[in-house]
Image (cartoon, coloured by chain):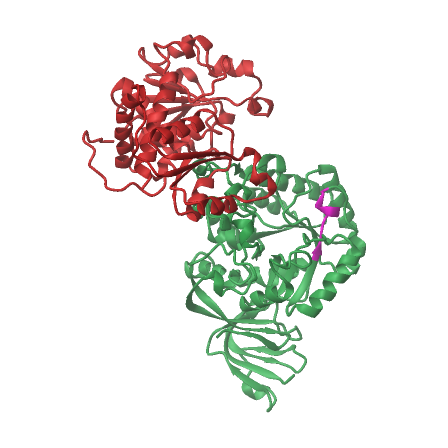
Amino acid sequence: MKEKILINARIIDPSQKMDEKGSIIIDENGKIKSIGKDVKKSNSSASAEIIDLKNNILIPGIVDMKAFVGEPGYEYKENFRTLSQAALAGGVTSIVTMPNTKPIIDNVSMVDFIIRRGRDKASVNLYPCATLTREIEGKQMTEFGLLSAKGIIGFTDVVKTVQNTETMARIMDYASDINVLIMQHVEDYELSKNGCINDGEVSTRLGLEGISYIAEKVIIERDLSLLNEFPCRYHINQISSKESLDVIKRNKENGMKFSVGVSINNLSLNENDIGDFKTFLKLSPPLRLEDDRLALVQGIKSGLIDVIVSDHTPEDEEGKRLPFAQAATGAIGIETLLPLALEMHHNESLPLVKIIETLTINPAKILRINKGSLKKGSDADICIFDLDAPWVVKANMLKSKSKNTAVEDRKLQGKVLMTFLKGDLVFKST
Amino acid sequence: MAVQKNTPAIKNLPKHLLGIQNLSIQEAKKILEEAKSFIKLNRSASKKLDVLHGKTQINLFFEPSTRTQSSFDLAGKRLGADVMTMNMSNSALKKGETLIDTAMTLNAMHPDIIVIRHQDSGAPNLLSQKVNCTVINAGDGRREHPTQALLDALTIINRKGKIEGLKIAICGDILHSRVARSNIYLMNMLGAEVNVIAPKTLMPRSIERLGVKSFTDMKKGLDGCDIVMMLRLQNERMQGSFLPSKREYYEFYGLTPEKLKFANKDALIMHPGPMNRGVEIDTKLADDINVSLVKEQVELGVAVRMACLKLYCK
């Protein structure tokens, strides 16, 4: 690889508290050689390739903590190749993949397969999760130690919650000893039974069974009580309501250590967007009130929420062309993650640096991976975007194999121009 | 809400009848006006017309129903349509065929109108996007049952002469009731004031946003009411954790002659049927022709459905 120098960039790297005009030099090994306002063309070798970024923004490659790749078992929804293309087009260079595949990733031999397959077919950094419990049944914990040794980054039952309190207590107790990351979906099944959207005016009008915010809140309350007894690395995958934030605030103020994520969907949409039974907006956790959405944005601002995830959930048309209650849950989103997040900058609800932080260094810290930063010596995983470029989301233009976007026809401002992975230019907008 | 006496003529109704929510006041009044003309016909010796001669009507019932299904069946036949009723509760859907597949199959047979009853809210909306013909909702999940609300309105108009200015109470399992929702929209639209009365566990979230007052106490909720609509309490709700027992429900929410006294002196009772006598309504009260409109509701149901079929079938 030839040395590269990217000049005329506005570099935003929250890991170094950097927001300045400058340049960045990538060495022959794809690592950051130098970065910042003091880096000049003359610092690079004479043969270096020069790329002029024309004052566009340069950030560390995005780390998405929650995405589903269809392999194995659901290749018709997404595969490593299509997921990689969608991710890179969205400036995402590192992905935490979900284990609810077919077969489920809950044993060591599956991990070998998934890592090998990912290495051969994917062109992004993959961090596979294994399930928290065998067969996602919420009963028996998986082999945390053995699976971690094989390269599993964290443990999650994805869209399922361990309902049994005793089981959850044991999981946390055991995990605290060997320091593995537990990523919990928070939902009480009895309270959410048959529910498919927020319990409120829209569910009353559409005649659909609702999921109350209480279903989320009671599990958070329970888990944080347990965490107090068994301090482990505990992460809440996604929250959706104001009331959950109140619980999180109280516990974080009491000095509890845990992390919290939110889906870009819950930051960009509310229950009214479901309109006349739009099944692409059937999500878990569900979209809630505008007040909840605003509270979640504030939660990011105040640091109660640590990361924004795409919750990329590809589903084929067949699964969505059904009466709402029967339709599949989830939306794709890895390609639109950054542009949607930038809305919160454009409408002045969040500082740009804060948005970038939740997409880069924060997830990297939770995962304890050496990503999300452009410090000297790091891998040159880089996303370059035009902050203001307008575009309209069209499902058929997106690179995912499934086209179930929740933001069809949305007018966005902010477009990824280039993505580098370990120094290689892997995506360029046309 | 101001209601004009003479409804201005509207040229075209929307293509489908999916719910009262999608209907304008003029459209609702046009249907009611049309239905009035069929009441007499249905009471006469010769009930057959040929306005739908050559038209094909398919009744697609995914949920068991007696009165709505037979009512649509008769209505279509009296207008001269070829009517086919498909009972889908034990049919292809169980073999894995989706609603869309069924719709496409039927669509290929060129029906002019499909009447659908489905257990999932929004199923008629989905169907209407996939077929060429008109779709009439005969009840979907807990969302809407527009022809029931229209027949209730016609029954009230028939007895009270108007709806505007009346106070109407809807009592019982509001949470699971499509009849309640459609009636809330229609009665509000036609200028009535609507109270809903239910135990808290059977009251939908944010129901006030639909333009009603909600009560948990029959005495307060029935105060000043001209019409008392009782809803069926399904037995399976008893076994769940919605209510402690049938006995307790009847004690607080069952309509008895004593409770009826909380309403206006000349108040009338309605029920969409089928009734659980002794659960939501006292059996004698239900049969008292001086106060109960239950039989009239069934009778006028046919007229309303004839009006809908005639107006929507193009």
- Count of residue discs: 0
Tell me if residue B238 comes above or below residue A411 in the rendering. Answer: above
Q: Is residue A61 left or right of residue A131?
A: left
Q: Position of residue A149 (x, y in %)?
A: 79, 59
List the single residue furthest toward the right.
Answer: A146
List the single residue furthest toward the bottom.
Answer: A46
Residue A250 in the magenta stretch? The answer is no
Tell me if residue A378 comes above or below residue B96 in the rendering. Answer: below
Tell me if residue B248 comes above or below residue B62 in the rendering. Answer: above
Q: Position of residue A256 (x, y in %)?
A: 65, 47
Is residue A133 visible to the viewer in this orientation of the structure? no
Q: Position of residue B90 (x, y in %)?
A: 57, 34
Which quarter of the figure is the N terminus of chain B placed in?
Answer: top left
Which quarter of the figure is the C terminus of chain B placed in?
Answer: top left
Using the image as rendered, state which of residue A373 and residue B193 is in the foreground.
B193
* Chain A, chosen colour in render: green
* Chain B, chosen colour in render: red
Using the image as rendered, state which of residue A62 and residue A253 is in the foreground.
A62
Residue A136 in the magenta stretch? The answer is yes
Is residue B125 visible to the viewer in this orientation of the structure? yes
Identify which residue is drawn at 56% across, 62% down.
A400
Q: Which residues are magenta?
A: A129-138
Q: Is residue B161 left or right of residue A86?
A: left
Using the image as rendered, state which of residue B271 and residue A80 is in the foreground.
B271
